[in-house]
């Protein structure tokens, strides 16, 4: 049997938004890796510990706050984490799970870990368990419909640049921006300039004690954490108008 590495989506932070399959994989894995930054308990770790009943959870440091591209800190963290997982397989583990907030195939650290471990472990099998994204959770909690009929949907991080965000607003019906908290003033300006401010909703710390969900127009520029989500919904003038 090939060694198995599974990226498990833990959702945006609410322990209730975790699939039955995710819990089963976490419970049965020989080792569960949770990415951490310093001594703080992150969202992925907190969600994992709300479900697992075993003590096979291992914290591994990742440069989660490093936003400067492929930095030395990030590369070192990927290499060290990959080496730790490879050593676990060498020591007899047959299945290792990596817990990630959101979905493992959407802007997740898991993809970098999987590439690293694949180069170290012969015949490695990589699987993923999907998780609910912040985009979906914010849409549900705010009562925002993401898509109807033939409408298109774009998701991008503001770290891709404001020009990319502006282009998405011009080309897609509903546009969702991640990681926009530190650029909220600019995000608001672009939405106003493109006539897309109406109905825009803001969300951060979804499902957590500090949850903040409100119209974007009501959010002060200095009140948004880095991991914030903004939804600019499609313009709709009638029921079923996009069919």
Image (tube, rainbow, N blue to C red):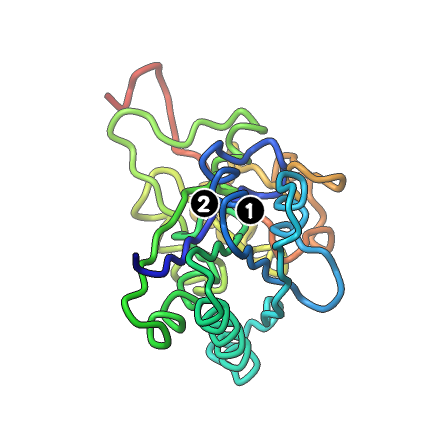
As rendered, which of 78 and 70 lies closer to the eye? 78
Residue 173, disc: none
Residue 39 picture location, percent across and down: 76, 65
Q: Quadrant of the N terminus?
A: bottom left
Residue 229, disc: 1
Query: Residue at left 48%, top 46%?
Result: 9
As rendered, which of 116 and 1 lies closer to the eye? 1
Element under label 2?
Answer: strand
| Apparent side of residue 158 relative to residue 1 in the rendered image (left or right) | right
Q: Are marks 1 and 2 in contact (CB under 8 Å)?
A: yes
Residue 59 picture location, percent across and down: 64, 63
Residue 206 picture location, percent across and down: 63, 39
Query: Residue at left 59%, top 58%?
Result: 34
| Residue placed under numbered mark 2 in the picture | 176
- Whether 2 is drawn above or below 73: the answer is above
As rendered, which of 12 and 81 lies closer to the eye? 81
């Amino acid at each position: 049997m090939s060694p198995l590495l599974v990226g498990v989506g833990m959702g945006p932070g609410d322990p209730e938004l975790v699939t039955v399959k995710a819990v089963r994989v976490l419970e049965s894995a020989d080792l569960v890796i949770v990415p951490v930054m310093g001594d703080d308990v992150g969202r992925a770790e907190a969600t994992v510990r709300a479900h697992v009943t075993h003590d096979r959870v291992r914290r591994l440091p990742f440069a989660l706050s490093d936003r400067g591209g492929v930095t030395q800190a990030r590369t070192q963290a990927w290499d060290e984490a990959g080496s730790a997982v490879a050593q676990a397989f060498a020591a007899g583990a047959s299945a290792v799970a990596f817990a990630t907030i959101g979905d493992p195939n959407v802007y997740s650290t898991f993809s970098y870990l999987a590439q690293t471990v694949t180069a170290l472990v012969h015949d490695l099998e990589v699987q993923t368990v999907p998780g609910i994204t912040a985009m979906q959770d914010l849409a549900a909690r705010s009562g925002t419909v993401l898509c109807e009929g033939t409408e298109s949907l774009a998701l991008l991080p503001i770290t891709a640049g404001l020009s990319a965000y502006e282009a998405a607003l011009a080309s897609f019906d509903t546009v969702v921006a991640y990681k926009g908290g530190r650029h909220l003033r600019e995000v608001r300006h672009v939405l106003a300039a493109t006539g897309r401010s109406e109905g825009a909703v803001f969300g951060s710390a979804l499902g957590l004690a500090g949850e903040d969900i409100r119209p974007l127009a009501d959010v002060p520029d200095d009140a948004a954490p880095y991991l914030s989500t903004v939804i600019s919904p499609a313009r709709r003038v009638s029921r079923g108008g996009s069919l």
